[in-house]
Amino acid sequence: MARGVALRCCNGRKSSTLLYSSIAKVSLSFSPETLFASFPIQPRRQNFSRLFCNLSSVPNTVDEKKYTEVFNRRMAMAGLKPHHRIALGVSGGPDSVALCVLTAKWKTEGLSGVSKTDGFIDGLVAVVVDHGLRQESRDEAELVCSRVSDMGIRCEIARCDWVNGRPKQGHLQEAARDMRYQMISNVCFRQQIGVLLIAHHADDQAELFILRLSRGSGVLGLAGTSFASEFFSQDLELDVKHMKNRSILLVRPLLDLWKEDMYKICQWGRQDWVEDPTNLSQLYVRNRIRTSIGNLQSDTFKSELQAVISECRRTRSFVDKVCTDLINQTVSVTDKGYAVLDLERLNPTEVKDICLSKYLTAVLQFISQRQRPIRGNTLKLLLNYIRAIPCRTSLTAAGCYLSPAPGSKGTKVIVSCFLDSSLPSKTEILNICFNEAQKRPTSDDFGQIISAAKTFSDQNRVSDVQFLDAASESVLSKARELNILSESTYTTIGLLQRDETNRFITKKEENKSVDESEDHGTNVASSSDKVHLLPGRDLYLMNRLLIRWDLSRHQCDEARCGKCPVRTATTMEVRHMVESDWLYLAELSRSLNRNHSTSSSHKALRSLKSIPAAARRSFLVLVNHCGLLLSVPAIGFSYCPCLKASTVFLPRVPLGGGFSSFL
């Protein structure tokens, strides 16, 4: 017997249970005149757990002009124009289908007619991700791809390969989301597309607000996801010409619209959509909150909740600007991979906690390249440390080592990557030609887009924010005092928060005994693991360092005798600098032999004197199979002139995490 699911069809009303045999398909033929016209219905026979809704008549209440204006305004805010190459993240649901409808209209009308290649709109690519977590996912992805293609949008399917096995149930949605962004970014980089549109809307922001409120997030977290931000691939996509990791501008142009608007846009565009029954499962926290909000919300509730989120976003925009200014004025980043903070210029005792916390988090995330939030006691410890001027002690926190800068009398602090173990076993081998500037046709456009978006964002910065001093637990109370929330909405949000908080605490207690009994492994290699590098190859480590070595044409005295340890090396081990390496350099410098290794060690030791010991430990070195130190590229040491070695500080994510706009 065929299974059935209760769906919401394009008339916005809940339909009766639909059987597979009754699922209908819209046959589409794209042109500017017919994109929003009526299409014939044809039967579809495939059996899927994700089903397309049948079309119904377009309601008279759909305000086409309103949706077009809202979308066009948001695209202008992001600095985007119709001629730009753009990718769409598409699942086939009403949200992403509505995004397809609006983007296709914006593209074609902005280009003053249809610019097509093989029947598709130029510069527009939809990406459907097949997570491969269900048996029927391949067929479903192909079905969605076919329907998007019928709209005149070129579509590509990205299939996930779970090399480490299927993610565990408790982390399934998070792992699927991370994989989805990774797969879409791979398509964008391959097709040289610099902009990705995602169909997040106002309901998603409301759900995230309740979720983070129940987890104790502060004002910055309650502001929700950003409208526009740079997304960096987990794998290094190196722009060789500029020696930096490439990024994609991630834009969410539907944040001003609600879920019900998505259905109306689909109706207006004469498109049906997919409804996934797993979205109704109460096993997932997002689904529970979505159901609760759906049962409780009214127009008043939605508008007031949106007003609170907007005020949080205004606050975050203000804090972001303060943080950016402080970084530009007080942070110096060296080419050796550590940062220097000027405490006198920073004057941390005069900076509000929320701004100083964001500032410290940004710097530590950059140096460690661990994009995790810093909270609780660790953040309090950092705030107390940075305000103790002059700084006399050292501190380890969030993957970093903070210590007074030599010769600064405690007015400057060095932030370096803290290393208490060997190199990670997971490394990335790159084949990069440094002498070849790889052409990126969209690079100029991308720079102009970012510049235009930043200009708009800066012009709309606010100085009068209400939640700057509000703690996590007082945001709702502050909103009620300011008459942003009515008493009924305040009570409703409090009930939603309390319910999800209790679920979260109960779940943690249930899993505590299991967690304690499990043997949690680490991603760090044991001391017996070794990382080797062949000549002429590039090794990217810890999301921050790129190292390579090769042989020069120079012939040293030992090479002529066939005893040069560099010439005889077929591979070299890469590791971090240790105390014995410093002692070895000191020993070489005292040698009576006036050879290359002696003079090179002299120069290296002079350079090391100005670098704190903690920062030196993050330097990469090259040794041969016997353990002989052959090179410390960061300070210019090489055992003999036969060796050409280099280390480049190349962080995957830049300082501040990349451009972001919270408007």
Image: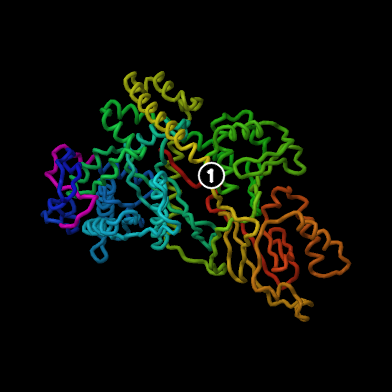
Q: What is the quadrant of residue 289 in the picture?
A: top left
Residue under label 1, please give it. Answer: 656
Residue closer to the observer: 584 or 102: 584
Q: Main secondary structure of the magenta part?
A: loop
Residue 430, percent from left and from top: 54, 65
Check disc 1 and give the amino acid type: Gly
| Residue visible at 63% across and 62% down in the picture | 530
Quick check: can you spot residue 83? no
**Looking at the picture, does residue 555 appear above or below residue 112?**
below
Q: Is residue 62 magenta?
A: yes
Residue 476, percent from left and from top: 41, 24
Does residue 464 appear to the left or right of 273 in the view shown? Answer: right
Does residue 36 appear to the left or right of 380 in the view shown? Answer: left
Q: Which span is picked out in magenta?
A: 45-66
**Looking at the picture, does residue 547 appear above or below residue 553?**
above
Residue lying at the far right of the rendered structure: 592
Residue 190, percent from left and from top: 41, 63
Does residue 208 appear to the left or right of 405 in the view shown? Answer: left
Residue closer to the observer: 112 or 164: 164
Task: Describe the element under mark 1 as helix, strand or loop.
Answer: loop
Q: Is residue 120 magenta?
A: no
| Residue visible at 41% across and 51% down in the picture | 167
Residue 595, percent from left and from top: 82, 70
